[in-house]
Image: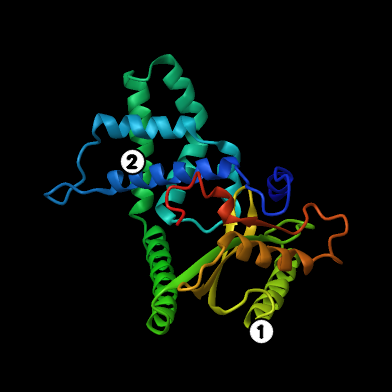
Amino acid sequence: HAKSAFGTAPALGGPRMTRERNFYEFLGSVDHLVRRIRRPSKSGSRPDMPDDVVEQFLELAIGMDAFLAASFDHHRIQPDIGVVLEVFRSQASVLRLLASEGRGSDECTRHVLQCVAACRKRFASDGCKAARKRFSQLQRQSIRSCGKYFAGLLRKHPRLFISRVDLYSPVCVGWWQMGDFLAAEAALDQLLRRLREGRVVESLLGYAVVRESGPCRGMHYSVLAAQDGHVPRDGGRVASAIGTEWVGLFIDSDVHPLSKANYFNCYAHLESDQWNG
């Protein structure tokens, strides 16, 4: 999947407008659906499904991008959303057929309600409850860790300038395979050492890195670099400097891989991203 994503970029640091972004928006809609399915009534019992929830379930199931959904086999995803995606994937063809014969028919509605009931049953299982708890704990832990780190920087430097860049390593077998993973981790260690030594970004105050896995983009690292915000900065240039340094680490290893080392300068979406500040 990473090969096709890299191939769409005209140059290093160029934007990658893939279906992945639309799929994450789709996951947001699924999350909203999950909350509605799990919502108890005031008495504590489960209410009957409103018609609009049935319609929302049907709309999302038949509109799901099956290719990207299958790409999530190697991802850790919020357990409840994962349950609904599994039901979507297994029942999408049946639901499309029933919808084509009449979206409001009793048979179509009955099948959707059966799918919803199957989701609820999975939500209530001990395995799903435990997975949901673990996922929430890791999520809170990551947020607290990142928040604590940047709060410490802000206490010393009241105004920070943050630059972001996404880094992609070469894929030789598959981005979830151990060989490619270890090579990427080793390169990241080298890059972070050079950042700490001040060889890439001037006046660097700190950085944060998170490893992510996108269905199209594959495994990559999102890097935040913090500098003194009282001095005028060029975020695009900082991101490009980090990305160029990253690509240089793989010059000798880029021999007939499925995809080459690359990076995405997040400032390339300056005009299109609503919250790009």
> Which residue does the numbered mark 1 point to in the structure image?
197
SS type, badge 2? helix
The answer to whether the residue labelled 1 contacts the one labelled 2, judged by CB atoms less than 8 Å apart, is no
Here the colouring is: rainbow
Distance from Cα at disc 1 to Cα at disc 2: 56 Å
Q: Where is residue 124 in the image (x, y as percent from the top left)?
A: 33, 54
Please tell me in which quadrant of the rendered image residue 118 appears: top left
Q: Residue at x 88, y 59 (%)?
A: 255
Near-viewer residue (95 or 23):
23
| Count of numbered circles in the view | 2
- Residue at image coords 41%, 46%: 28
190 w.r.t. 98: above or below: below
**Where is residue 1 drawn, in percent x and y?**
68, 47
- Residue at 66 percent of width and 49 percent of height: 14
- Badge 2 local density, few (<14 within 10 Å), some, or many (20+)? some
Residue 117's tag is 2
Return the x and y of residue 266 as percentages of the image width and height.
Answer: 57, 55
Residue 187 location in percent, x, y? 72, 72
Residue most toward the top? 101
Q: In the figure, 149 relative to 90: above or below?
A: below
Q: In which quarter of the image is residue 257?
A: bottom right
Residue type at mark 2 is Ala
For the C terminus, the quadrant is bottom left
Q: Residue 269 carries which label?
A: none
Give the camera-side residue of 107 and 204.
204
The amino acid at mark 1 is: Glu
- Residue sitting nearer the eye, 185 or 38: 185
Q: Which of marks 1 and 2 is nearer the N terminus?
A: 2
* In front: label 1 or label 2: 1
Left or right of residue 206: residue 219: right
* Residue pictured at 48% horizontal, 21% vertical: 97
- Identify the element where label 1 is drawn: loop
